[in-house]
Amino acid sequence: MKDAQPKAIFLKDYQTPNFWITETKLTFDLHETYADVISELVMERNVSDYPNGNDPLVLDGQCLELKSVALDGVVLAEDAYSTTAEDLTIPNLPNAFVLTVVTRIKPQENTALEGLYKSSKMFCTQCEAEGFRRITYYLDRPDVMSIFETTVMADKARYPVLLSNGNLVAEKSLADGRHLTTWHDPHKKPCYLFALVAGDLSCIEDSFTTMSGEEVALKIFVEPQNIDKCDYAMDSLKRSMKWDEEVYGREYDLNIFNIVAVDDFNMGAMENKSLNIFNSSCVLANPETATDTAYQRIEAVVAHEYFHNWSGNRVTCRDWFQLSLKEGFTVFRDAEFSADMGSRTVKRIEDATLLRTVQFAEDAGPMAHPIRPESFIEISNFYTVTIYEKGAEIVRMIHNLLGTEKFRAGSDLYFQRHDGQAVTTDEFVKAMEDASGIDLTLFRNWYRQAGTPEVHVFDAYDEDAQTYTLTLKQSCPATPESSDKEPFHIPIAIGLLDASGRELPLQLSEGGEFNENDKVIGLREREEAFVFENVPQRPTPSLLRGFSAPVKLHFPYSRDQLLFLMGHDTDGFNRWDAGQTLATNIILELAENVKSQIPLTLDERLVTVFSDLLTASVEQGAEALDKAMVANMLTLPSVAYLMEQQSPAFVHALYSAREFVKTELARQLEGLFAQVYQANKLDGDYQPHPDHMARRALKSLCLDYLMDSGNPAHIERAESQFINSNNMTDQSAALRALVNSGDTEVATSALDRFYQQWKHDPLVVNQWLSIQAASDKLCGLEQVKTLMQHDVFDWKNPNKVRAVVSVFAGQNFRHFHGEQGAGYQWLADIVIKVDGLNPQIASRLVGPLTKWKRLAPENGQWMKFALEKIQKHNKLSKDVYEVVSKTLVN
Ligand code: B3K
Ligand code: ZN
């Protein structure tokens, strides 16, 4: 480590700030090698919390060259204040004053992409969570909210567009070919929502009329060559604005809303007030260059950032321990928006898959934390699937417990009560309680306890009494913050099916909480029995419908019961889930055979059920069948998911067993896969319409199986799709098929053609990189190293690093986990190298290694060595230090 070991900070130590900043006036003078920042802060002591306080003012600041400090216009002598690498301290201050601080920064050298930095030729900012302190000295904490006015000065030819938050209030030309703009944001905000952009940008313009008749000018700014790729983001923005009015009654609050796309960005996007800054991958799309997945992500991210205007900006977080207050709620909001725009069941399947594959793993690993953590070393490490996706599941459970109307009353009350404030998750729950009259005392345990609860369900049928009893037992494994867990309040949606698949009416005779309308059991105790009466025959239970709680539910279903549920359950999610459980059981059993070197045979029932699904999808009248649902049902659980189901996990056995199942299905059902492939071809122009996306997804899946069938004839099919497709979804699916064909010549030639066609487009090049990195047929460790030598690879660009390194480590199970830990050592070296450039990205790259204790020692030990190698490095960032040290200890 650099200095002393970084220290954790604790929620219990929270104190209100001892000063407020009521107004913030910033002037940026941007140059080619530096930028000067003048900050004028109108400040006052927080006398209501500290009546006799005369503590010094301590402003946060990092990587700043301090030029001068002035108090009420008088420059302070150097001994009137002191600085460290992290702050500026000024003692002996009056209760109200104006502080003027001049600093110089080097945006051109900022590879961490936090604060003010350069992305290709433009200046841009990223301040959440603690990036503002790299711009100027400030109280960089979300409970300090201020009115901002920002002036930006720069060379007019290089940077004709100068943007900041709020309304444009002045614009003028200066000497030497320079110019300035001044922006005033009338809404007070914490500095993490500050933004600035300067560049040579083109924009598309549109407008939106709000429900009270206000006209909002909408603009999307991009580099000029991308101007033809903004329409879908604009369309998504307008749909989001309308949806938030209709579903939440939330209206936009300024007459201007800007989005800017930048190539170098650590995350997906940022909700800065009225000036959202996006990773270009979450904005740019046209049919030739963007896949359906990219279109869906653009729609979701645009909506997410827009929704933050209320859930995040108007009502913000008191401190960063409350991050899920804005993120969990906003993810819930964007998930509902996406469900309304497309298929609700499919969206639920996607979200549950992410949760069960990635979040459950995080909750069972060394970095497990409650959605409201108690402590952290580096807040950037806590932008996690737990805070975001589990946080959204907690809000979803509140929604389901209250019902739509009371939830809306709760959100109205929350926004009205806390508008303009920085609050805690407790205040969110309290508003929900107050508006609904429903007691959420026990429910609050979801906020303070980490870990995925496990629910074991046992059933008993009494034929004489005609009663059916479900006994539920809950427990939660120990996590780093606690080993002794209180019970959770777990809503479990259920149904009972009779032998012909009909739903039986549910009449509870004994037991605890049961919502008859929604058919939801509320499990509150460690163990509870629910007795249903007038049950004429032993039913098959359908449990945790719609994934009604983020738990692992266990019921000893037989394979025949799972097949029955796949065919009959009225809940689409559970039909899919039964299929996943069946496939998982089969693969896990085969993995044991792989380990014992017993020859593998596939359970015929899986072949039959796949055959039935494929046949049904091409039968007459099958148009009504949701093709996306079929595609999901035909998708085998991923190796990452399977790894979570086996303890310890034997990666290679799981990988081999899964490959065996896939190849067998492909061989035995080759004709049907080909038929379904043909039946889902689309003529005409590309449309990002859910039905079309579903057909393309099903077609791509069939092509993927066909490549595994061993019949070389299908290579021609893929070649033809590669050449003739009019959209990137089909072209990249064909490329993936060819790369995975097992024929190196075919693969190389397709990759060359694709590269020649698209080398000018960075986002398409990212796909070219990731298709290779993911391919276990083509890309071993040596190949991925070669790929990183390619001219297009750029260590400083997070999208490129993710496209190669994260994809290889997260998707290429065969090679990343092979060769006696060589993949892990490779990753360790990369983490160390990237940490010197961009700690946030480096820290995320450590992710795959955090599983070391979950893996069988044949892999786990090698992972541990790799972690130790990183730990020994003597210049680790706080970000990487926190993940590595916790991973080795917990
Ligand atoms: N609020 C941003 C997160 C930025 C964090 C950077 N360390 C994106 C979002 O969730 O909308
Ligand atoms: Zn967010």
Image (cartoon, rainbow, N blue to C red):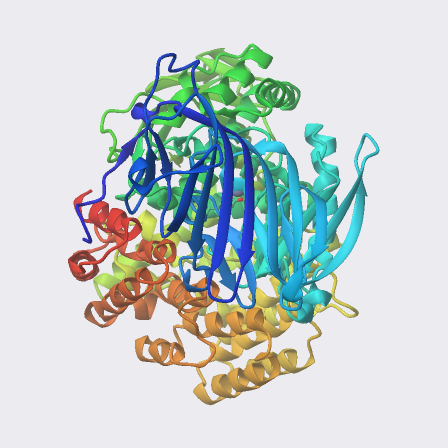
- Can residue 613 be spotted in the picture? no
Q: Residue at x 20, y 53 (%)?
A: 2
Q: Position of residue 81 (x, y in %)?
A: 32, 37
Q: Position of residue 641 (x, y in %)?
A: 39, 52
In the rendered view, tell whether residue 473 sits above or below residue 6.
above
In the rendered view, tell whether residue 840 sits above or below residue 202.
above
| Residue 769 located left or right of residue 300 | left
Q: Quadrant of residue 596?
A: bottom left
Q: Residue at x 69, y 61 (%)?
A: 618
Q: Residue at x 69, y 80 (%)?
A: 724
Q: Residue at x 60, y 36 (%)?
A: 333
Q: Quadrant of residue 335?
A: top right
| Residue 620 located left or right of residue 412 | right
**Which of 100/877 is in front?**
100
Q: Position of residue 450 (x, y in %)?
A: 33, 32
Q: Position of residue 670 (x, y in %)?
A: 55, 72
**Which of 184/295 is in front?**
184
Q: How many marks?
A: 0
**Which of 405/47 is in front?**
47
